[in-house]
Amino acid sequence: MLGFILQRLWQALVVVIAMSALVFCGVYAVGNPIDVLISPDATQDIRAAVIAQYGLDQPLWQQYFTFVGRILHGDFGRSFVYNMPVSELILSRLPATLELTLAAVLFASLVGIPIGMYAGYKPHSPVSRAIMALSILGFSVPTFWFGLMLIMVFAVQCGCMPAGGRGETVSLFGVDFSFLTGDGLSHMILPALNLALFKFSLMIRLARAGTRELMLSDTVKFARAAGLSEFTVLSRHVLRLISIPLVTVFGLELGSTLAFAVVTETIFSWPGLGKLIIDSITSLDRPVMVAYLMFVALLFIVINLVVDLAYALLDPRLRKGRA
Amino acid sequence: MTETTSNMVATPLLEVTNLKTWFPSGRGELKAVDGVSFSIAPGEVLGLVGESGSGKSITGFSIIGLIDEPGRIVEGSIRLEGRELVGLPSHGLRAIRGKTISMVFQDPMMTLNPVLSIGTQIKLALEAHENISATDARQRAIKALAQVRISDPETKVDFFPHQFSGGMRQRVAIAIALLHRPKLIICDEPTTALDVSIQAEILAEMKELVSELGTALIWISHDLAIVSSIADRVAVMKSGNIVEIGPALGVLTKPQHDYTKALLDALPSRAKPGELLLRGSGITDAAPPPRKSATANLPPLGGPYLVIDHAVKRFEKPVGLLHGLAIKSGLSQPVTVVQAVDGVSISLKRGEVLGLVGESGSGKSTLGRIAAGITVPTAGTIRLNGQPVMSAGRSPKKITTRIQTIFQDPFASLNGRMRIGDIIAEGPLAHRLVSRAEAPEYVKQWLAAVGLDPTFANRFPHQFSGGQRQRIAIARALAMQPDVIVCDEPVASLDVSIQAQIINLLIRLRAELDLSLIFISHDLSVVRRLCDRVAIMYQGRLVEEGEAGAIYADPQHAYTKRLLAAVPVLPQAAE
């Protein structure tokens, strides 16, 4: 197991280094932030001074190594726009996205998996057919449209839900969270629902396919032949066996939702990371873009590592192979 | 229906009358079980014999109430101690399953849940019928494992299925089936997936347990010899019907029905070596097409042809940089190395059939793959007529077309998305044995030679049965015009009568084409029928080698003796 973790850390390191070079070069190839930073009528002297101040006059490789050197000291640079350290900026926005994403992914899993298992257990019942039709809808409806509809129906027509913002927040360990207040929670429901829709459909389909296949397997037949009740068969045998592909998708979806909740956050004006990255792209805020993409790469590495460890927990065959 | 009623006890444990289980298929109904009647007395062992598709397994599943949708029992009755089971609601059936009737399945690799420990699975089966505390369940699990002769049950109870061999897993399945002391156990081919010696052990133990506990048994099998060694009475099934039922010795030595006779005649152990089996002459085979490649320069028949010299194959996982460091510093355990073939030297004479016999894991298949140039040996040389089979260098490739292989599973070895004509023509076209224009005619000739209708060429593999697919695989191998064919358990997955047809085909083609065969098998009676010489493999080494007749008559090595002793034998008629 230790050898395996070492191996993965080594891989992670390689990925982060490659990612940093890729992101740095990619972002520096597009646009000129100076045009955004200073007014068009500034004198050439001021222009040159600003360029020198940000080190933009140096060759690319030199800029890259300065950048890497600073990262090693924990300094990701300062945002051009907000004029504050990027790490601080990202950390201040992270909790909002984190709570929204977790709510969405947990809802999708906790509701989607049981529903999907039911649909796989009784594939021909009308309820199962309705569930599957719903899941196809969930796949095909664009997120932005569904979000707008949610706002139209619940915020504009009924007026029972707020249309945007985080609402009232409570500070816990120095971080602001919405889900601890009633008002914050009501602000969270619509965006979380919107964000969950696709994942919800995905979980339903995966759970259904896995359950359907397993219900015909000898393992399930043997369990039934021993007199186990259908509920025990489903909860103890089938759920454990389908959990491995589900965990894979859970991890991937958690990562991509955390990183790219852009559309939902924009529609519901949720002040999370997605909005931050969109804003920094439009204003060519290079340090934020670079740091954010690095953060995303790191996030995926960590999530994948956790998923791999979860495999070992779920499947004893892997435990032995790597012990 | 010939129902022998003389054996029936006044109060049968189970009475099946006119059972019909049908599966709707397309417009009609597939009558899997079509009017089966029999009864079992308490403690009696009934053997249910038939080929695949005869409905023997469906009969078992009907009794325990686990028929896959959309199948259903359309008629008949199943009475357990006088109580009708047909039409019982699902919770009523569940209360009986595992408690009064339990079942053991064919493949122990598939029946146990790989992610739950043995103890947990036994606990779940206990909780299905009684309220039991965790500590009591554990104690019961340990006792149950001890009952089926699993050593050190206190430790083994926390094992997961993958830590057990196939035979051990089947013991665990039997332990679970015995948990609630059922009155009837249905065993659906429980030893088919196991090696001969393990099979013999399980059979002996099962017999002992059944007589000890007074449990009745329905033993479903396609193998008459196994059934004869355990059953009191035998029922022979064909197309959903029981064609003959009676005391085991009577049915097997003095069969009344033609089908039973035909089944017995198809058994390889019944025929003399080298002779065609009685069944399987139904299809007339055409002569194979003329060989194109030069056959000059070959040694005379009987001269050494394929020479394997000190072949070694080690399997080990590649180790990454950091993992390697972790192993060296003692933080991580070293990777396990499997020595599949451990220095084997053997030569195949031209025109002979060499049987390679051993249990699973003995390295026989790996040796076959090395001989055929599929697997690269770790060390050692393989030469065909003095020429190396594989090229030298870092990643050796097979450089001869004169050795071909027929694989065990005809379902996995044919590409399901290619027409069989293309499958057969692919190799000859790639090696320019035939031109694109000649290919269709060439394929037709080979299809006719293996006893298939030449017009089948543009069908897909899924349209054929297992036996037909194996014929296609043989045609594919022969179309490459080889001199040597490595047959890796080519009949292991086929029914007896189909098996007889394929063996007959191999015997005929070998004579017509002067082929040399390496015949890999775990079935000693098939090997006896077909092979001139036999080599016995055990744990990667060759333990005995010699003329087939000599080895069977007078085995020298202890392992060979054990292997021969474990083969179930049919009782001989006292005529």
Image (cartoon, coloured by chain):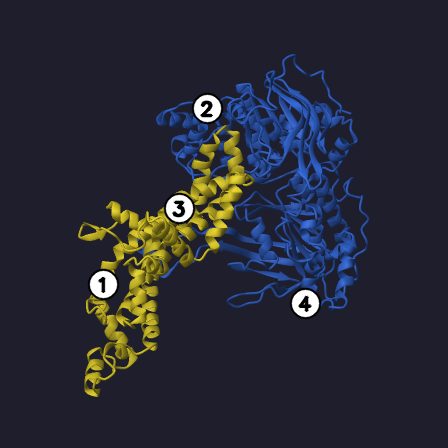
Q: Give the distance between the C-alpha atoms of the residues marked 3 and 2, in whole angstroms.
A: 32 Å
At mark 4, the secondary structure is loop
Q: Picture coordinates of residue A296 (x, y %)? A: 32, 61
- The local crowd at label 1, few if under 14, some if 14 to 19, many if 20 or more residues have their Cα within 10 Å, is some
State the residue at coordinates (64%, 24%): B46
**Residue type at the position of mark 2:** His
Q: Give the distance between the C-alpha atoms of the residues marked 3 and 1, in whole angstroms.
A: 30 Å
Disc 2: which residue? B129
**Residue type at the position of mark 4:** His
In the rendered picture, chain A carries what hue? yellow
State the residue at coordinates (72%, 34%): B239
Disc 4: which residue? B431
Callout in the foreground (3, 2): 3
Mark 3 in CB contact with mark 1 (< 8 angstroms): no
Chain letter corresponding to the colour blue: B
- The local crowd at label 3, few if under 14, some if 14 to 19, many if 20 or more residues have their Cα within 10 Å, is many
The numbered mark at residue A89 is: 1
Disc 3: which residue? A109
